[in-house]
Each structure stands twice: as C-alpha cells, then as structure tokens.
Image: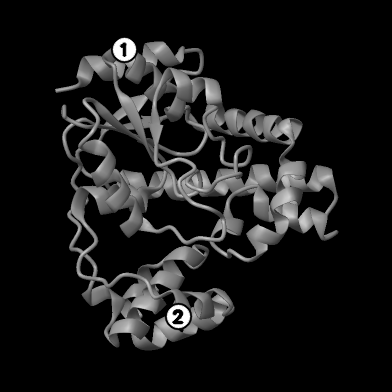
Amino acid sequence: MGKPIFIAGATATGKSAVAQEVAKKIGGEIISVDSMQVYRKMDIGTAKPTAEQREQTPHHIIDCTTISEGFDAARFVREAENKKTKIEHPIFCGGTGLYFQAWIEGLGEAPPGDPKIRRTLEETPTQDLLRELKEKDPETYKSIDPHNPRRIIRAVEVIRITDKPFSEQKAEWTNRAPKNFFLLERAAQDLRNRIEGRVEKMFERGLVEETCSLQSELENNPIAQQALGYRQVIGHLKGEQDLPETVCLVKSRTWQYTRRQKTWFRKIRGAIEVKAAEAELEKETAQRIIDLIE
C-alpha cells in the first residue's frame, strides 16, 4: 500500500471531482469519508458518485449498509482498515470531520454501541438528551454541537453503558494532520453559488421523488433522516412548506452546514490548504495537489 492521501473539505467545494482526477492520474482508489453516502438508495440527496464515475475510479465505503442499519465512526474505521490494505494508492475523500479524526487519531476506549439503548435514545427528544448530558457530563455538553443528534446520542449511549462521562473515554486528539492531508477551500461567494446550483440540480434530478420512496425508512432512522435535503423534503411532504420554500431551506441549511464543516477542519493543524479558483478545472486543482504530495 502506498502512502494515503487525504482530500477534505466542505460540501460543494468540488472535493469528490478533484479526488477522482487525482485517482485517475496516480492510479488511486477512493475511500469515501461521508457519513451519509454509506446508505443504499440515498443517492441524489447525498450527491453519490454516478455508476459511470465509480466504474472509472473504484470507490469504497459507499452503499455498504441499509437505511435501517446503524453506521458510526467506529464502523467506518473498521471498514477503512479493511479496504486500505487492499489498495495501492488510497485516497480518503469526504466532508465528515469526525470520521477523518477517528481514522487518524483513534476513538479511545469507548465501548461498541448497544442496539437496544440506541433505539431508546433515537426515540428520545434531543432536548431531553441534552439535559441528561449536561447533568452527567458537563464537559461534553459544553463542546458538543446541539444540532448534531448523532453525536449527542452516541455520547449519552456511552454514558449509559459505562456509567462514566463520555469525555473521559474519548481519544485525546491532537488535531494534527498527517502527511498529505489537503483541505480544499473556495471563496465564500463561489461556494454559495455552487451550493445553489448543486441543490437546484438535486431537485431537478428527483430529490422529492427519492425522498418520498424512502420516507418510511428514513423516519425510522433519526440519523439518516438528518441528511441535508431529506429532512427538509420530508417536511414538505408533510405539508410544512411548499416546494419553492423547501428548495430555499435546503440551500440555507447547506450553507450553514458548510460553515460548521469549515470550522471543524480549520482546527486541524498542518493541513495543506488548496484554494480552488472559480474558473479552475478539477484536473488543474488535482495536479496542484499531486505536485504537493510528499
């Protein structure tokens, strides 16, 4: 196995297309670092690579579980460990910061999930879970994203299983990037424009129809239904807002999410920032990355 390459970035920066160009040039294969592309049938809303793209460049840890199953950072690490030993030039690409950190620095001593406890927590209102977290682990409560139910559920799950604070069981992360960790960036207005185009294209391709066909499965998986686009379209299907409002809402939520992603990635010290120009082709950005590989 060659040295791994990491290409991280916020949603709509174009990292997947750039990673595919890098893979073509060096004969690499892509290990997806995306917590939603793991689910089968969630194709349009997760911007999954097309069948043609996957035929040109092998992709891994995509379509590896059903919506009814769970998937977390620990499973990602196991899957990635299994895949990377079989790939000559692995390229880790995605926007799920927790998965990157879990792979690079480990998960600590936290226990595996308990399906029964997990189901109970998934049925519990987020505010109730936050109150429990505040009482039992104030340190984690202060640092956790209150809009990220996956992380909240996992923290409370670990506390209930071990009867110890989650903060005492996490790995001590240094936030130091490994070699060849590239962070793809874009100017704010360029990113906004790309988000708008991306969302409009998803609706044109049939995001509403896809969500409608998956609605019952999504509603039984509180984690999967948090995926950008699906949650808002489910609201539309329930009559909470009309379609034009839904499109605007998805654009707004995506922009907010990219800001959180950028905040996360900027904590990683030593990452090599690669700012893609608006008119720059993906293959040109890919070549700049290749030229920087150690």
- Residue sitting at 49 percent across and 63 percent down? 148
- Describe the element under mark 2 as helix, strand or loop: helix
- Residue sitting at 52 percent across and 29 percent down? 49
Q: Nearer the viewer, residue 26 or 69?
A: 69
Residue 138 coordinates in the image, percent (x, y): 34, 81
Up-down: is 262 above or below 49? Answer: below
- Residue sitting at 31 percent across and 12 percent down? 25
Up-down: is 85 above or below 111? Answer: above
Amino acid beneath label 1: Lys
Residue 146 coordinates in the image, percent (x, y): 49, 68
Q: Quadrant of the N terminus?
A: top left
Up-down: is 199 above or below 222? Answer: above
Q: Which mark is residue 68?
A: none
Residue 18 coordinates in the image, percent (x, y): 41, 22
- Describe the element under mark 1 as helix, strand or loop: helix
Mark 2 packing: few (<14 Cα in 10 Å), some, or many (20+)? some
Reading the image, the residue beneath label 1 is 25
Q: Nearer the viewer, residue 80 or 271?
A: 80
- Which image quadrant for residue 162? bottom left
Q: Quadrant of the C terminus?
A: top left
- Which image quadrant for residue 7? top left
Q: Answer left or right for 154 relative to 209.
A: left
Real-space CA distance between mark 2 and mark 1, rounded to the nearest whole angstrom: 46 Å
Q: Answer left or right for 4 relative to 9.
A: left
Amino acid beneath label 2: Ile
Viewer-side label of 2, 1: 2
- Residue sitting at 54 percent across and 25 percent down? 51
Colour scheme of the picture? one colour
Reading the image, the residue beneath label 2 is 117
Residue 236 coordinates in the image, percent (x, y): 80, 54
Upstream in sequence: badge 2 or badge 1: 1
